[in-house]
Amino acid sequence: DARRALDALGRGGGRIIANADPAERMMMMARDYAALSAKEQRSTIVIDPSRAGRDALNAEIRTQLIASGRLAGEAVTMRTLESKGLTSAEARDARSYEVGDVVRFARNYADKGIAKREAVTVKGVDPAKNAVSLEKSDGQTVDWRPRQWGAGKSEAFTPGTIDLMKGDRIEFTRNDRTQSRENGGRA
């Protein structure tokens, strides 16, 4: 209910920035966000409806925060995994996977040599056979037929990187008890 949502935003002291030029809109939002105090930033949400828009907005906000000195020092590049968000039907179709994707299984498949939460990398895709070649961290390969096993108990990710600097805030989106990280935890 967009009307109720926008009314609630207005009552809460929020602000809507609308501009037909996406680059100008992103710059305005980033500039306004960077001008907020640290406390105000913690209670502020900045939204763009698309993934590409979100990424562009985050990049512009980072540029503004670096320029203002809120982010400083040498950047450290960290690996990231972005969920592909596959539906169950897509997860069973080899064409949904690309070389370089990372797949994690939510249960053990001992007969296939796959351990629960193990991250394996897609090394090849054969759509005709609906087969995906997976490589484990020890170099072993596994012939995965997603229609036959594991697709319902797996998640696929696109690997990426992110540069972090002193002053950055991050939020974890998966539990990892071995690292004492909880979904929604911040650092």
Image: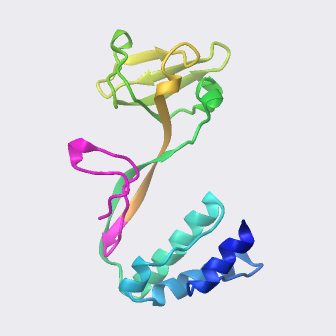
- Nearer to me, 80 or 87: 87
- Nearer to me, 35 or 66: 35
Q: Is residue 154 above or below residue 80?
A: above
Image x and y of residue 33, in percent: 50, 83
Q: Residue at x 74, y 73 (%)?
A: 3
Q: Is residue 113 above or below residue 67?
A: above
How many numbered tags mark residues here? 0
Residue 85, can we see it? Answer: yes
Give residue 52's quadrant in the image: bottom right
Image x and y of residue 70, in percent: 35, 83
Please tell me whether residue 182 belongs to the stretch shown in magenta.
Answer: yes
Q: Is residue 158 above or below residue 162?
A: above
Q: Which residues are magenta?
A: 164-187
Q: Residue at x 45, y 89 (%)?
A: 36
Residue extending farthest to the top is 111
Answer with left or right where residue 105 lies relative to residue 83.
left
Residue 15, can we see it? Answer: no
